[in-house]
Image (cartoon, rainbow, N blue to C red):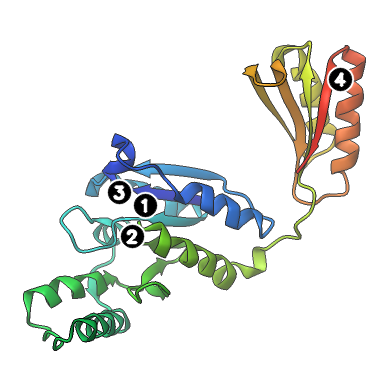
């Protein structure tokens, strides 16, 4: 199974000035296609750290959405870091720069002004967003035309959610349509009282061993608003005929242990 990852660049996330909106949206988009987010990472606006993170992501072979830092301000380093990570040069991308000029022309027309020539400093700064790592292919931006880009399985999007989120959907539907899974019951669980995780670990290990590739998950709580100290214990898998059998075995094991099942959940 292909794994999916997320890298979000930006000091503002690590300082708390902004809250990440990309991980929840990517989880939602993947789930609608029968897929899951396998990992996520936040990286500050540091070229060396970004290059190291991208080098590791590229080596993983995972499909990775990378959000933020593809602009042309001094704190935008993603394009440069991607080139450094993959060992390729930056170069003007003719199609990307044509889209940038088209957007600039639209904005000038809205203001009743003439389009600035390429030599103008403002246009030069805009065109820098179309200087991409060699081999990059474009990701369309339906919001303002300024494209993102892909390098293999690394996909670079703007930091703005209004732009990035439809571009995420495009990447999944266009580049990974073959990996979409049927969407069905993926989790069955129950809320349990009267037992600790350590006591239930042998049961969890047995269920995983007997019902692979089904996975067991455990989410303990000490102050649940309804159940107080409890554990949500369940099984999860891509739509799998053994999911129901695995859950039945888990439930029977809990009853044999003497745990109290408060409620049951299906997702």
Q: Determine whether label 1 and label 2 are within 8 Å by CB.
A: yes
Quick one: quadrant of the C terminus? top right
> Residue, x 31% and y 79% (percent of image)?
96
Query: Could you tell which of marks 2 and 3 lies nearer the N-terminus?
Result: 3
Image location of residue 188, percent across then percent down: 80, 38
Mark 2 vs mark 4: give the one in front: 4
* Residue at numbered disc 4: 254
Indicate left or right for 187 with 144 as reference: right
Is 5 in front, or is 83?
Answer: 5
Query: Could you tell which of marks 3 and 4 lies nearer the N-terminus?
Result: 3
Instruction: Tell me the distance, in whole angstroms, between the alpha carbons under discs 1 and 4.
Output: 44 Å
Q: Determine whether label 3 and label 1 are within 8 Å by CB.
A: yes
Q: Determine whether label 2 and label 3 are within 8 Å by CB.
A: no
* Residue at numbered disc 2: 86
Mark 2 vs mark 3: give the one in front: 3
> Residue, x 85% and y 28% (percent of image)?
250
Instruction: Tell me the distance, in whole angstroms, between the alpha carbons under discs 1 and 2.
Output: 8 Å
* Residue at numbered disc 1: 54
Query: Could you tell which of marks 1 and 4 lies nearer the N-terminus?
Result: 1
Instruction: Tell me the distance, in whole angstroms, between the alpha carbons under discs 3 and 1.
Output: 6 Å
Is 22 in front, or is 108?
Answer: 108
């Amino acid at each position: 199974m292909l794994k999916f990852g997320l890298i979000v660049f930006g000091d503002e996330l690590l300082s708390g000035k902004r809250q990440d909106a990309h991980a929840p949206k990517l989880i939602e988009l993947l789930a609608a296609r029968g897929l899951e987010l396998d990992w996520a990472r936040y990286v500050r606006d540091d070229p060396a750290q970004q290059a190291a993170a991208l080098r590791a992501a590229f080596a993983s072979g995972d499909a990775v959405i990378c959000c933020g830092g593809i602009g042309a301000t001094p704190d935008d380093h993603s394009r440069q870091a991607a080139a450094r990570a993959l060992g390729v040069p930056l170069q003007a991308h003719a199609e990307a720069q044509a889209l940038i000029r088209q957007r600039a022309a639209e904005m000038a027309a809205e203001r009743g002004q003439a389009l600035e020539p390429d030599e103008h400093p403002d246009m030069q700064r805009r065109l820098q967003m179309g200087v991409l790592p060699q081999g990059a292919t474009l990701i369309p931006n339906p919001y303002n035309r300024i494209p993102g880009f892909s390098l293999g399985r690394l996909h670079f999007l703007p930091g703005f959610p209004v732009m990035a989120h439809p571009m995420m959907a495009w990447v999944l539907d266009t580049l990974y349509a073959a990996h979409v899974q049927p969407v069905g019951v993926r989790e069955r669980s129950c809320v349990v009282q009267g037992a600790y995780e350590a006591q239930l670990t042998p049961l969890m290990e047995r269920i995983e061993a007997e019902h692979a590739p089904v996975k067991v998950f455990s989410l303990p709580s000490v102050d649940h608003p309804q159940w107080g100290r409890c554990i949500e214990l369940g099984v999860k898998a891509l739509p799998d005929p053994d999911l129901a059998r695995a859950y039945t075995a888990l439930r029977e094991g809990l009853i044999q242990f003497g745990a109290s099942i408060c409620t049951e959940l299906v997702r």
